[in-house]
């Protein structure tokens, strides 16, 4: 590689390369069952990340959501059980 | 400290936490249904809802879906839970659990490497521990469809982020089949989102599933 950083351990095995894309945790919160609302997630950028729903132990989750990248507002409408919403940037 | 590459992309950061490999192993099936779907339980310790985790299962070109578990995200602090998943593959299933670096302490066998600390003193990155590297993203909509992505030989799916839904369909003879939404690798570049026949029951019932969308990353690590 001509640019970037690589980190090796003492057996010369590579442990980090800046050429790889890392999953970075930005924010995570619980959406209560049968709820709707909105929240600002200022450090999340949907152009370089993704939002995921973790149904946790509850398979009765039905959730509609939207993220506006300009206002950084995440809004949701849950008609089922509680779920965890997590925001990740890939960089 | 933040390090960017020549294209302005972040490569190292003490602010945005990367995710470390916290647990890994393989589990054997504990039961099989009358449709040939095998049940697996992995006992792991996971954080509460304020910190995400990725529970990744290796594809064996099998049908794969998540099951209900005793994981309650409203409980504060770490929880020891049995994450249940189902597969059409009968052999041992490999799993990997990733959490943020500030979740639980860890030990390593060497002092050689690099650590980054966040402004509040927590570890943001430690090169001695494998981190979650992004391979590709399954953008799962409300439709069941085939998703094409980059070629990955041994994908690990973050199955805890799969948008599970389920329903019942009559199949005649006074019976019904219980179906749950899941995925199946069909080639190195293709994944099919489908309903898996989980169990046939001797009752005539119908219940339509309600699908929702989510994103499931395919994750790997260096040196494991």
Image (cartoon, rainbow, N blue to C red):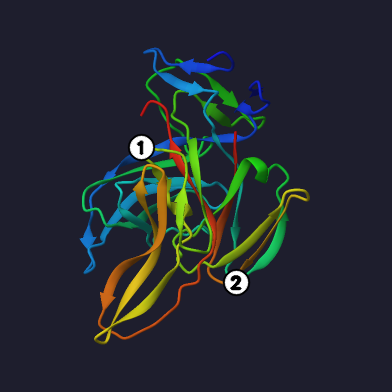
Where is residue A55 drawn, in percent x and y? 49, 60
A67 or B190: nearer the viewer: B190
- Per the rendering, the mark at residue B153 is 1
Whether discs 2 and 1 lie on one chain: the answer is no
Q: Is mark 2 on a helix, strand or loop?
A: loop
In the picture of the structure, the residue carrying the numbered disc 2 is: A34
Number of marks drawn: 2
Q: Looking at the image, which residue is at 40% across and 12% down? A: A10
On screen, residue B24 versus residue B142, left or right, reads: left
Chain letter, disc 1 residue: B
In the image, B79 versus B6, the foreground residue is B6
Instruction: Tell me if residue B119 comes above or below residue B76 in the rendering.
Output: above
Q: Which x, y percent locates residue A25? A: 58, 41
Distance Cα–Cα, label 2 vs label 1 = 40 Å
Give whichever of B46, B170 is nearer the camera: B170
**SS at circle 1:** loop
């Amino acid at each position: 590689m001509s640019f970037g950083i690589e980190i090796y351990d003492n057996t010369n095995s590579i442990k980090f390369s800046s050429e790889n894309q890392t999953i970075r945790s930005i924010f995570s919160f619980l959406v209560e069952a049968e709820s709707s609302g909105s929240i600002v997630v200022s450090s999340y950028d949907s152009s370089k990340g993704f939002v995921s729903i973790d149904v946790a132990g509850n398979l009765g989750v039905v959730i509609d959501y939207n993220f506006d990248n300009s206002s950084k507002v995440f809004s949701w409408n849950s008609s089922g059980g509680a779920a965890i919403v997590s925001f990740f940037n890939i960089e | 400290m933040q390090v960017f590459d020549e294209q302005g992309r972040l490569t190292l950061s003490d602010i945005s936490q990367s995710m470390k490999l916290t647990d890994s192993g393989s589990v054997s099936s504990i039961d099989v249904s009358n449709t040939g779907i095998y049940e697996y339980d992995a006992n792991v310790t996971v954080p509460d809802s304020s910190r995400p985790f990725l529970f990744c299962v290796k594809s064996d070109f099998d049908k794969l879906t998540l099951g209900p578990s005793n994981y309650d995200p409203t409980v504060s602090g770490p929880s020891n839970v049995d994450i249940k998943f189902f597969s059409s593959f009968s052999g041992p299933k490999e799993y990997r659990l990733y959490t943020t670096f500030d979740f639980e302490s860890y030990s390593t066998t060497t002092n050689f490497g690099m650590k980054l600390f966040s402004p509040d003193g927590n570890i943001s990155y430690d090169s001695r521990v494998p981190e979650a590297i992004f391979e590709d993203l399954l953008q799962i909509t409300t439709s069941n469809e085939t998703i094409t992505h980059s070629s990955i030989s041994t994908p690990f799916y973050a199955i805890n982020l799969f948008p599970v839904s389920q329903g019942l369909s009559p199949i005649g003879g006074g019976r019904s089949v219980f179906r749950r939404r899941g995925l199946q690798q069909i080639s190195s570049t293709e994944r099919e989102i489908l309903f898996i026949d989980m169990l046939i029951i001797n009752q005539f019932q119908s219940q339509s599933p309600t699908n929702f969308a989510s994103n499931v990353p395919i994750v790997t690590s260096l040196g494991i």
